[in-house]
Image: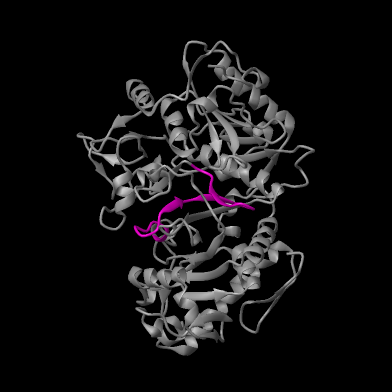
């Protein structure tokens, strides 16, 4: 079997390469080397050292002529000079080339489950468990596709090395995750956290696909049992994106990353990367059942018999598990189908409003959809951190700010064009609190009510109801939904003090407006809140 492209980036052809091993071989390699342990449920467990999450302040893009005027520079995409990258790139190559005896694991596969729009990718790693992660998360190639496989982007994972000269280079720390779009390569050093590889390819797809008129999205997707009535679910952590898109009546397309082309929606990934902290078999049976042979758990706590305590967050609250999407029984992939479907009939923006002022469901106009897509709002609950006595608003553009490579308005413009062309309906669903904040005794909207709302949206039944404009925040809300308490549909009715509701709503409105100023667009608001008009070039 030929391995093309190694010498073109400076890697020796004489290394001990192990390419696209079976899952059984990867598990055997990682256990025998002491990298992982086998849990009693058949999954393997690994600790990722001091890094149990991404290192966003250590992520850089090389300043290159071809991309410097396109990249959204700032806290998300930090620039780095080419000569610094070259120094660390050569150090990463030397890490591999200087040791011809150690095993080098290669994963060749794809970012994107779509033959016409997928990105052929290669990941090199010295640890078998890192190759296992890639096997789970990226789209696995067919055996015949490996014969003449030519990667169009390569990740060199040199997690064992660090940049000792980072102060001289003016960088944040000795850890580095650096992308060269000209060289079509990324290098990783100083961190073992596997999510850097997953989100690294996501960032590259966020750069490449919009330039082909394909919208790259941080969302989940499901369909009805006939493969129609496609729905997208956008939402930040804690809003219910994974929970609500995992539905036994609707097959899952994918749970995190998708593209929207002229042919429809396609999953970027071949697996799922779910949070495992406080995982409960009753509340999330699909994810719980997916943790078996082939799954890879990160940083979980276990006893001497390797029985996992999912409630123990002493290592990190960001415990994770990766598994092939085929482990989800009710998924397209599990039935042998490609994770590609038609155009979405419905788009749902999920938010968890801890202020208790947003309606449980609102139908959005095109302008409002653009506004809330760019805003990407949710709120942290008071009491989760010492000294936090009230909710904290969080804004993440396009519901995935840390992974955007281009300016948020580029993705918003693409979404606007596709919503218009394919006549998708957009709803904002609040899975948070009504009648006040949790610190004042208000209750979170029940999962039963939220699921009823989602069901009414997806069936189209919600459109048969009358809608009214909610005066304070300018939302169009239904006056009735079968199976849902009518009072919660208009939040002001749930507040004991209507004046206090108006006060809090005005405060949240001001946060929205202040956040939106950073995008440099003139947005006219109604009296209290809500975009009345967004420039045509948005």
Q: Nearer the viewer, residue 359 or 77?
A: 359
Q: How is the image coloured?
A: one colour
Q: What residue lies at 60% left-to-right and 71% top-to-bottom?
A: 512
- Give yes or no for residue 13 being in the magenta stretch: no
Question: Exactly how many numbered labels are in the figure?
Answer: 0
Q: Is residue 124 left or right of residue 252?
A: right
Q: Nearer the viewer, residue 134 or 494?
A: 134
- Residue 316: x and y in percent read 38, 45
Q: What residue lies at 37% left-to-right and 80% top-to-bottom?
A: 482
- Residue 432: x and y in percent read 42, 70
Determine the residue located farthest toward the left in the rendered image.
305
Examine the image and state in which quarter residue 386 appears.
bottom left
Q: Is residue 406 left or right of residue 428?
A: right
Q: Is residue 19 left or right of residue 156?
A: left
Question: Which range of residues does the magenta coloring cover?
Answer: 244-269
Q: Nearer the viewer, residue 77 or 400?
A: 400
- Residue 400: x and y in percent read 56, 54
Q: Is residue 508 above or below residue 210?
A: below
Determine the residue located farthest toward the front in the rendered image.
226
Q: What residue lies at 39% left-to-right and 70% top-to-bottom?
A: 450
Q: Is residue 484 above or below residue 412?
A: below
Do we see residue 360 in this rendering?
Answer: no
Do we see residue 98 in this rendering?
Answer: yes
- Residue 447: x and y in percent read 35, 68
Q: Is residue 153 left or right of residue 198?
A: right
Examine the image and state in which quarter residue 517 appears.
bottom right
Indicate the quadrant containing the C terminus: top left, top right, bottom left or bottom right: bottom right
């Amino acid at each position: 079997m030929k391995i093309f492209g190694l010498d073109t980036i400076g890697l020796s052809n004489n290394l001990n390469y192990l390419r696209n091993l079976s899952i059984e071989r990867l598990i055997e390699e990682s256990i025998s080397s002491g990298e992982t342990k086998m849990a009693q449920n058949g999954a393997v467990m690994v600790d990722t050292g001091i890094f149990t999450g991404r290192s966003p302040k250590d992520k850089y893009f090389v300043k290159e002529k071809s991309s410097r005027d396109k990249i959204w520079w700032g806290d998300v995409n930090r620039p780095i000079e080419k000569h610094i990258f070259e120094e660390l790139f050569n150090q990463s190559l030397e890490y591999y080339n200087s040791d011809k005896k150690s095993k080098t694991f290669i994963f060749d596969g794809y970012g994107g489950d779509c033959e016409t729009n997928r990105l052929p990718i290669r990941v090199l790693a010295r640890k078998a468990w890192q190759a296992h992660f890639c096997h789970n998360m990226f789209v696995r190639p067919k055996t015949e596709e490996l014969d003449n496989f030519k990667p169009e982007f390569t990740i060199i994972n040199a997690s064992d090395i660090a940049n000792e000269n980072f102060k001289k280079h003016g960088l944040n720390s000795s850890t580095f995750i650096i992308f060269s779009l000209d060289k079509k390569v990324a290098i990783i050093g100083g961190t073992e956290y596997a999510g850097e590889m997953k989100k690294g390819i996501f960032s590259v797809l966020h750069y490449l696909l919009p330039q082909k008129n394909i919208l790259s999205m941080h969302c989940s997707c499901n369909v009805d049992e006939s493969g129609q009535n496609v729905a997208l679910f956008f939402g930040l952590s804690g809003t219910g994106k994974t929970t609500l898109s995992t539905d036994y009546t609707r097959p899952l397309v994918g749970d995190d990353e998708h593209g929207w082309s002229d042919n429809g929606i396609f999953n970027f990934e071949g697996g799922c990367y779910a949070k495992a902290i406080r995982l409960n078999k009753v509340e999330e049976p699909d994810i719980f059942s997916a943790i078996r042979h082939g799954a890879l758990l990160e940083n979980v706590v276990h006893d001497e018999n390797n029985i996992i305590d999912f409630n123990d967050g002493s290592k990190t609250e960001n415990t994770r598990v990766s598994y092939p999407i085929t482990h989800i029984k009710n998924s397209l992939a599990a039935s042998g189908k490609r994770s590609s479907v038609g155009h979405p009939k419905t788009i749902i923006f999920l938010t968890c409003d801890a202020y208790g002022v947003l309606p449980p469901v609102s139908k959005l106009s095109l302008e409002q959809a653009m506004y809330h897509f760019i805003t990407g709002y949710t709120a942290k609950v008071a009491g989760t951190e010492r000294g936090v006595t009230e909710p904290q608003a969080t804004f993440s553009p396009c519901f995935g700010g840390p992974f955007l490579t281009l300016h948020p308005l580029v993705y918003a413009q693409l979404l606007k064009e596709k919503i218009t062309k394919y006549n998708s309906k957009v709803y904002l669903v609040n899975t948070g609190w009504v009648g006040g904040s949790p610190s004042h005794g208000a209750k979170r909207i029940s999962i039963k009510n939220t699921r009823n709302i989602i069901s009414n949206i997806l069936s189209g039944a919600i459109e048969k109801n009358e809608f009214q404009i909610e005066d304070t925040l300018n939302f169009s809300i239904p006056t009735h939904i079968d199976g849902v308490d009518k009072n919660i549909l208009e939040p002001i009715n749930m507040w004991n003090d209507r004046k206090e509701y108006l006060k809090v709503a005005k405060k949240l409105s001001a946060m929205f407006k202040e956040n939106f100023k950073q995008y440099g667009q003139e947005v006219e608001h109604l009296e209290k809140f809500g975009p009345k008009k967004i420039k045509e070039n948005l």
